[in-house]
Image: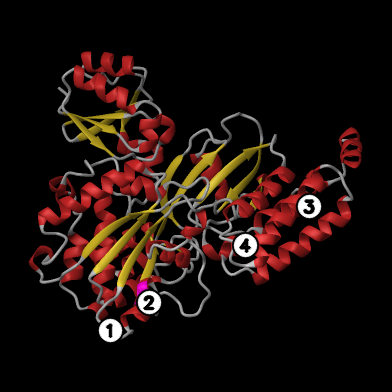
Amino acid sequence: MTDRVYLSMDAAARSVGADDIASALSRAGCELVTTGSRGMLWLEPMVEVERDGVRHGFGPLTPDDAAGLAAMDFPDTHAKALGPVEALPWMQAQSRLIFARCGLIDPLDPDMFEAEGGLNGLKTALALQPDAIIDTLTRSGLRGRGGAGFPAGIKLRTAAAQPGPVKYICANADEGDSGTFADRMLMEGDPGQLIAGIIIAGRAIGAETGYIYLRSEYPDAIRIVSKALDIWRAQGWLGENILGSGQRFDIHLRRGAGSYVCGEESAMLESLEGKRGQVRAKPPIPAISGLFGKPTIINNVLTLASMPWILEHGGDAYAARGHDHSTGTQAFQLAGNIAQGGLLELDFGISLKRLVEEFGGGTLSGRPLRAAQLGGPLGAYIRADRLDVAMDYESLAAHGAMLGHGGIVVFDDTVDMAAQAEFAMAFCAEESCGKCTPCRIGAVRGRETLAKIRQGEDVSANLDLVEDLCTLMSDASLCAMGGLTPMPVMSAIREFPEDFKPRAEASAADRVD
């Protein structure tokens, strides 16, 4: 007999009908527990039923499927039966440290969170002195998961060394890159992991206030995080006397207003201060002078969410995972034209080929894969015959690419890479904060010039002009918005030159082939 029924109700599952599944199961009298997603998005909406402590999956479901399964007590012989979820190849291959509880617990049930070890890392940190926390995180080799890959321990130590009683922790949850959704999944599935990480970082530098800057396009995450903060205060896990330790710390939730550039740390600070989201010139860095001029740690959601595991298990245990100087795990997100899209948490070093072909199952269209873009709309394109690259910071940098936030967007052989290059410049022109000339003007000229190339107008000279513009933008832009826009443009030109030939020349080449 089925004990409980678990249903993923994160935004991805809801977008394909999870609300209707919940209604059907409730009408059938099921004891329903709503959870985050396991990350197998092609199987959503998916339910899990618990029998003798083992969860069995069924999906993807329609409301009729759900009603029929409930009436039959979820037989393992059903066409939508997946078997024990933990035994599925997608799950077995993972090293789930950050996402260990996602899909397992109700994100707003503090008893479930605590029973699954959610407070262990925080309790360890509260028993340590700040220097010991920083030493542990430094020893782990944890690097920023937002894209820059800067060592988290160095940043914490810099802020901790600054004088004065007022310091801040800011969680950058303005997840705007195409093909990325790890921050959203964690906040909707296990917000406590992030909250605990923010408190740990606060204790490390002597801060008593934290902010979560969450993009307005994530209404479900906003609702869940807001409720989670209230629950943590009610539990005594957040506020004046955390877990009876005497530690004071509180967290405020702030919504972004749809600006991509506010994912850049200094523009985010401007927005938090109620100003227009524009990039600040550096120095000073935020760890010295950040929010309201005070020392501020700004980290991505996954960076902060890694800290509880590290404090619980030790810096050496974390450093033992991963590859070379890329220690620990990374949340890889598969999106675009992909048969099995979703999120996997794996040790650094796995090949892009395995991620796309083995876990992703190739293209959804069934056509040959042509390219994968890594690191969001400002990331490089990797050709299908060069997917053997290891997914870590150093290996990708050697290939002229970047890991970014771990997003991977797949394209089949129908993609027009010249159109993709033009899109990169158009995206920059649209999202630029406008503060620096290389980004503000360079992106507009780049978009115009690439449009001429696509029309076959003086292609050779215009390609030279695009290269000059890209060099200027890379060297002179204030931030990564303009500085990285050349990466997808030049990688498309370099790796797919046939898409940038004059039309007559390209047609002749096609006839020869």
Q: Residue at x 80, y 43 (%)?
A: 454
Report the disc number at residue 449: 3
Q: Nearer the viewer, residue 35 or 395?
A: 35
Cα separation, mark 2 vs mark 3, equals 41 Å
Tell me whether the residue at label 4 lies in contact with that at label 1, contact meaning CB atoms closer than 8 angstroms.
no
Label 4 sits on residue: 482
The magenta stretch spans which residues?
292-296
| Label 4 secondary element | helix
Q: Residue at x 89, y 50 (%)?
A: 458
Q: Nearer the viewer, residue 224 or 12?
A: 224
Asked whether residue 77 is in view, the answer is: no
| Label 1 secondary element | loop
Label 2 sits on residue: 293
Which numbered disc flags the more N-terminal residue, 4 or 1?
Answer: 1
Q: What amino acid type should be assigned to the residue bearing mark 4?
A: Gly
Label 1 sits on residue: 164
Look at the image and say whether residue 509 sits in the magenta stretch.
Answer: no
**157 over 251 or under it: above or below:** below
Cα separation, mark 4 vs mark 1, equals 35 Å
Which numbered disc flags the more N-terminal residue, 3 or 1?
Answer: 1
Structural crowding at the residue carrying mark 3, measured as other residues with C-alpha within 10 Å and reported as few (<14), some (14–19) or many (≥20): many
